[in-house]
Image: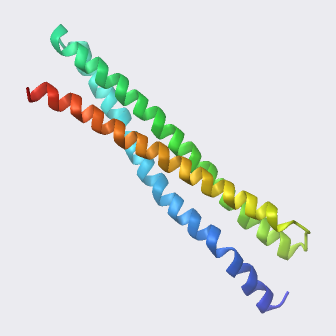
Amino acid sequence: MNIQHLVEILQVSIAPCVLISGLGLLLLSLTNRFGRTTDLCRTLNDEAQLADESELSDLRRQIKLIFRRCLMLRTAIAFNLFSITCAGIIIITIFAVYLLDLSVRYYVIEGVFTLSLLCLISSLVFFLIDIRMSLNSLRIEIRKHVK
């Protein structure tokens, strides 16, 4: 293999590598949010054990809402990880095509890249749902203190 051939391989694999880098940062944000949400759910659950009847209703509503947020974040993380996996498969496929002289149709690579982007969009949709739900949780907390 000559150097020009290697340069071509690296050029083609740059887009999926950049995608993985961005997805990794999004994953970091999602997992941090998930950790904070689960900790908050545990804290509210402990508070509910000690709360009187007047506070218990609001605490239960918040716990249910925060648990649903955890489910949304888990789904967003799953889509994000699948997107990263697809991008990795693309890179491996590109190298296999060039190094092993395999005959893979370009629409296969394009299809996996499209699937990766669709998973990214799905992850972002669930992330936005979580943000909307977090505002609903905040609204419950504000109503409790400001009447």
Nearest the eye: 47 or 144: 144
Q: In this picture, is 13 found above or below 80? A: below
Occupied quadrant, residue 6: bottom right
Q: Is residue 145 left or right of residue 48?
A: left
From the top left corner, tell me how far across and down residue 36 is, in percent: 34, 40
Q: Split into 4 quadrants, where in the image is the N terminus?
A: bottom right
> Which residue is at 48% across, 50% downward?
124
From the top left corner, tell me how far across and down residue 137 is, in percent: 28, 32
Q: In this picture, is 6 found above or below 60? A: below
From the top left corner, tell me how far across and down residue 132 is, in percent: 35, 40
The furthest residue to the left: 147
Q: Tell me if I can see residue 36 in this picture.
A: no
> Which residue is at 74% across, 64% downward?
110
For the image shown, how many numbered marks are present on the structure?
Answer: 0
> Which residue is at 15% across, 28% downward?
143
Q: Is residue 62 left or right of residue 13?
A: left
The furthest residue to the top: 53
Nearest the eye: 93 or 119: 119
Q: In this picture, is 119 found above or below 104? A: above
Q: Tell me if I can see residue 32 in this picture.
A: yes
Occupied quadrant, residue 53: top left
From the top left corner, tell me how far across and down residue 111 is, in percent: 75, 58
Q: Split into 4 quadrants, where in the image is the C terminus?
A: top left
